[in-house]
Every structure is written in structure tokens, then in C-alpha cells.
Image: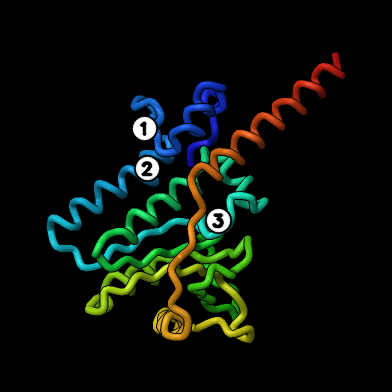
Amino acid sequence: FRLTKLLDILPHRVLRKLIRPLSPPPPSDLSHPYFNNYNTIKEIIKLSEAYGVRRIVRLTGLSTGFSPFNPVAILFNLLLSQSAKFHALAEQALKATPIATTILRPGGLSDEPREEGQGLEVSTMADIPPPARVTRIDVASLACFAATRSSEIGRDETISLRNAPLADGACADVEGAFAVVDEQLTVKNEATKYWSPRSYDLVFATTSYTLLYIAARTLAGLL
């Protein structure tokens, strides 16, 4: 993760974002999510189209499906250099290609195995609430299964996921999770909705300068 730097909220940079939401940061800052979350994916898409790749599996995050005005999205975008914004742009770039795409949106990743009695809960409707903890093993298993399953129908899948009790309807294995995905897409196959990138920039600027103002007033009161 790249934490937001003070340079990111300099007035001329914030104004540039509001005018040109897709403008890149300085090329010397290759750790920025613009390059890692977005520009790299565009290059992968070009290579995939050139070499006849049939399906791309992409890992983003649960907050990518939230409104930029959602408190969780505001926090992540403020702290992590607008990572959700660039994840969303990457998802849109993937969906614009003829290549079938599976996008996985986990919440908090865990190195620990599932707790006893837990399984996998998946949803194609972005209705899984945070924090949505899920094991890295489960995410990797879903990614591998998605990459190797048939892509003949060329369907795009955007899947939010978390570990949840089996008693609440979670699936015991990956095959069961994708059976739920198939059923949900058959019943309600709506296009994933995205907000304008300028919305993320507006919230980022407003929140950043509000916090700076509060910090300045607090510091002035202490002096």
C-alpha cells in the first residue's frame, strides 16, 4: 500500500485532478495507485488481447463497490492515495474489453485459516458489508477456479466475498460459491455501476482540506 503523501494534497495537484481526473502523477512516483492499480492493468489488457487470453482474473477490494461518499471509501481513499478510485477505473477498463473478466472484491485479508463453522459468502450485487474478513487461501482458490473454468460464454463476473458462518448460507467450498454466482447472474445480471472519477477527487479534496483546517485550528489553540 502507498500511504497518501503531503505532496498529493498540494493545491495545484488537487486542482489538476479536478480538471483532469485521469491525469497521471509524476513519473518518478511509480508506487502511486495510478500506476499499480490502473495503468498496469491497461498494459495487461493490451497483452491479453494480443495473445488471445480468454479470461482475466483481477483482485480489487470491497470498497471499490461503495459510493465515494461512503465513510469506508472516504477513509481508504484518504489514507491510501485514492486506491479505490484507481481500482474502479481498472475494473471499467477490463469490462470494456471483449475478454471475459472475473473481478474479486474481498474485504480485509487474513493469513489465518477459517474459523470452525465458517464458509465462503459471495455476492454479485455489492451488498456484502465491511469489514468482510476473508482468508487469503479462499481468495486464491476463487481466483484459480475462475481462471480455469470455461469462458465460452464470455461472461463478466464481479464478486464481493467474505467468510461467514455456514449456518447463514455461506458455501463450504469454491465450487459451491461459484454455483451461487451463476445463480445470481442468471436471476439478475445487471451491469456494475461506477461513479465518476471526479466524484472521488471532489471528496478527497474536501476531506483533505477540512482535516488540514481542523489540525491548523487545533495547533493554533495549543500555542
Which amino acid lies under the numbered mark 3 shown in the image of this protein?
Ser
Taking the image as shown, residue 131 lies to the left or right of residue 29, namely: right
Q: Residue at coordinates 51% horizontally, 60% vertically from top-left? A: 111
Could you tell me how far apart the alpha carbons at marks 1 and 2 are, in whole angstroms? Answer: 8 Å
Q: Is residue 175 visible?
A: yes
Which residue is denoted by mark 3 in the rendering?
63
> In the orientation shown, which residue stands out farthest toward the left?
51
Viewer-nearest residue: 79 or 137: 79
Q: How busy is the neighbourhood of tag 1: few (under 14 within 10 Å), some, or many (20 plus)?
A: few
Q: Residue at coordinates 58% horizontally, 39% vertically from top-left? A: 202
Which residue is denoted by mark 1 in the rendering?
30
Q: Is residue 101 above or below residue 3?
A: below
Q: Is residue 204 above or below residue 25?
A: below
Could you tell me how far apart the alpha carbons at marks 1 and 3 are, in whole angstroms? Answer: 23 Å
Which residue is denoted by mark 2 in the rendering?
36
Q: How busy is the neighbourhood of tag 2: few (under 14 within 10 Å), some, or many (20 plus)?
A: some
Q: Residue at coordinates 85% horizontally, 13% vertically from top-left? A: 223
* Disc with the residue nearer the chain's start (1 vs 2): 1
Viewer-nearest residue: 107 or 103: 103
Q: Is residue 215 above or below residue 203?
A: above
> In the orientation shown, which residue stands out farthest toward the top?
223
Which amino acid lies under the numbered mark 2 shown in the image of this protein?
Asn
* Disc with the residue nearer the chain's start (2 vs 3): 2
Q: Are marks 1 and 2 in contact (CB under 8 Å)?
A: yes
Which amino acid lies under the numbered mark 1 shown in the image of this protein?
Leu
* Disc with the residue nearer the chain's start (1 vs 3): 1
Q: Position of residue 45 (x, y in %)?
A: 25, 53
Taking the image as shown, residue 43 lies to the left or right of residue 6, namely: left
Q: Residue at coordinates 58% horizontally, 50% vertically from top-left? A: 68
